[in-house]
Amino acid sequence: MADIFHEYGEHYRHKQALPVSHLKVMRAVERCRTAALGGHMQQCDSCGYERPAYNSCRNRHCPKCQSLAKVRWL
């Protein structure tokens, strides 16, 4: 969903009159787990390899953030 919002979201927002709540969800999903929300470095205990881990948006409508809750529910 984030890829779709990235590709078409701006155009869609200009063409449609959306409620503020919908705009907030779209922006949250677009920014989820990107540098826009900040992050931290994760380090492997075995080899010391580091990689960035970006913060999630924690929005209840975000498929990335709610995937664990969905698995638990199913």
Image (tube, rainbow, N blue to C red):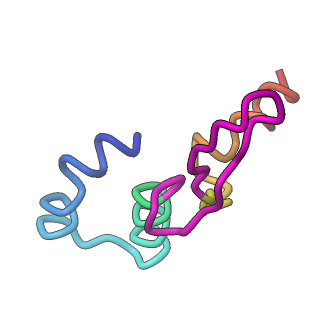
Lateral position of residue 74 relative to residue 8, left or right: right
Tell me where residue 3 appears, x and y as whole percent: 32, 41
Tell me where residue 59 appears, x and y as whole percent: 64, 60
Lateral position of residue 24 relative to residue 61, left or right: left
Q: Residue furthest top?
A: 74
Q: Quadrant of residue 39?
A: bottom right
Task: Relative to 53, say whether 68 is above or below.
Answer: above
Q: Quadrant of residue 36?
A: bottom left
Task: Relative to 39, say whether 50 is above or below.
Answer: above
Magenta stretch, residue numbers: 32-54
Q: Residue at x 12, y 65 (%)?
A: 15
Along the viewing direction, whichever of 22 and 43 lies nearer the viewer: 43
Residue 34 among magenta residues? yes
Quarter holding the N terminus? top left
Q: Residue at x 59, y 41 (%)?
A: 64
Q: Residue furthest front?
A: 47
Along the viewing direction, whichever of 21 and 27 lies nearer the viewer: 27
Residue 6 among magenta residues? no
Q: Residue at x 46, y 56 (%)?
A: 34
Tell me where residue 37 appears, x and y as whole percent: 53, 68
Q: Residue furthest bottom?
A: 20
Quarter holding the C terminus? top right
Q: Quadrant of residue 44?
A: top right
Number of labelled discs? 0
Q: Residue at x 55, y 68 (%)?
A: 38
